[in-house]
Image (cartoon, rainbow, N blue to C red):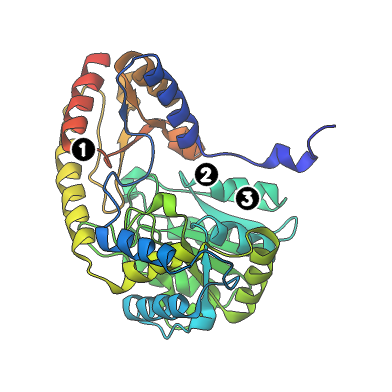
Amino acid sequence: MKLAERMQRIGTETAFEVLARARALEAQGRNIIHLEIGEPDFATPAHIVEAAKQALDQGWTHYGPALGYPELREAVAAYVSRTRLIPADPRNVAIVPGGKPIIFFPMLALLDPGDEVIYPNPGFPIYESMIQYLRAVPVAMPLIEERGFSLDLDWLRDHLSDKTRMLILNSPQNPTGGVIPEEQIRAIAELVRDRDLMVLSDEIYSRIWYDQPPFSIASVPGMSEKTILLDGFSKTYAMTGWRIGYGVMPEWLIEAVGKLMVNSNSCTASFTQRAGLAALEGPQDDVDRMVAEFRRRRDAFCDGLNRLPGVRCARPGGAFYAFANVRGAGRDSRDLAERLLQQAGVACLSGTAFGAWGEGYLRLSYASSYENLMEALDRIAACL
């Protein structure tokens, strides 16, 4: 028996591969500083954990509705309406196990073989993986350092075609930390509003920003009915292992996502939905403190990277990644990332893990303690 041909078209996420190799080195007694995985190093806020404990005690351990419990869908709709200034309705909300289903399910529902999808490169690798898996055509949109890792509107205008069925935006962005300025978002909306396509707006880092707040394309008049808004709890509330996210999209697409949920997951775990409700409706102090600490780390870590020979790194506007230009170090980024892991005990990712336009860069997550980051700088300096 052999695997189906389609499995040759599906990719993976390098961060988990590097994490596994780093853990193997730790098992051999090596000390490894983990800057590879994209998850906050903070504990889930106590009131969220307590809500989950109470939910377990109260019997929230059974099947729930495929698209989520009504009270959580209502809370998400209210939150999105307030933060994106759009009239979101609970009927537009799907509660799913993590953020990735809001990439995969809408793509499954919308894309036929040969349809074109424009996506950011460097960008989250699951975008391209799913496009390839569905036999759609990936059209890589280069994000250039000189533009603050934002996109080129002229490039986008030239590459929109009659076959374009989806445009993927991610702001704040993984891996660069770039934030697309509001004026560019509005210009993008003008380019796509009258086209037969959907925008997948990945806003999973929407609460983690430092200078200018991110602006959602769903907030532009006429765009909420053309936008699939992806957000969730993993990054904002340090809930990566809870596996709970949500999508906000037109009701006709919600119906299709509900069918795919029934055929795959049945539903999102009931007690985690109670935790999600507590996250949205409870105090936000822990989020504010976490972002403030990320800012402190960003400033110190990026400044330290800029003092290293052959390295330069702009301060990102959001998320918790430093996307460092290492072209001056004299090695390709994949080789340098491997040397840092094996020789310096610093686990990070080659920019090529996020697409061809990531060559010459390393992604280093500063979702690690300040002390670890300072030690990592010393180790990188010695290796260089």
Residue drawn where x is 38% and y is 58% of the image: 171
Residue 305 seen from this side:
no
Q: Quadrant of the N terminus?
A: top right
Q: Are marks 3 and 2 in contact (CB under 8 Å)?
A: no
Residue 79 seen from this side:
yes
Q: Amino acid at mark 2?
A: Pro
Separation of marks 3 and 2 at Cα, in angstroms: 9 Å
Q: Nearer the viewer, residue 192 or 26?
A: 26
Q: Indicate the position of residue 342 as horizontal and vertical percent values.
A: 38, 15
Residue that numbered label 3 is attached to:
130
Counting residues from the N terminus, which is met first, the one under dot 3 or under dot 1?
3
Q: Indicate the position of residue 279 as horizontal and vertical percent values.
A: 32, 66
Q: Amino acid at mark 3?
A: Met
Quarter of the figure with residue 102: bottom right
Separation of marks 3 and 1 at Cα, in angstroms: 33 Å
Separation of marks 2 and 1 at Cα, in angstroms: 26 Å
Residue drawn where x is 41% and y is 64% of the image: 57
Q: Nearer the viewer, mark 3 or mark 1?
A: 1
The crowding category of the residue bearing disc 1, from other C-alpha atoms within 10 Å (few below 14, some 14 to 19, many at least 20), is: some
Q: Secondary structure at mark 1?
A: loop
Q: Nearer the viewer, mark 2 or mark 1?
A: 1
Counting residues from the N terminus, which is met first, the one under dot 2 or under dot 1?
2
Residue that numbered label 2 is attached to:
125
The crowding category of the residue bearing disc 2, from other C-alpha atoms within 10 Å (few below 14, some 14 to 19, many at least 20), is: many
Residue that numbered label 1 is attached to:
369
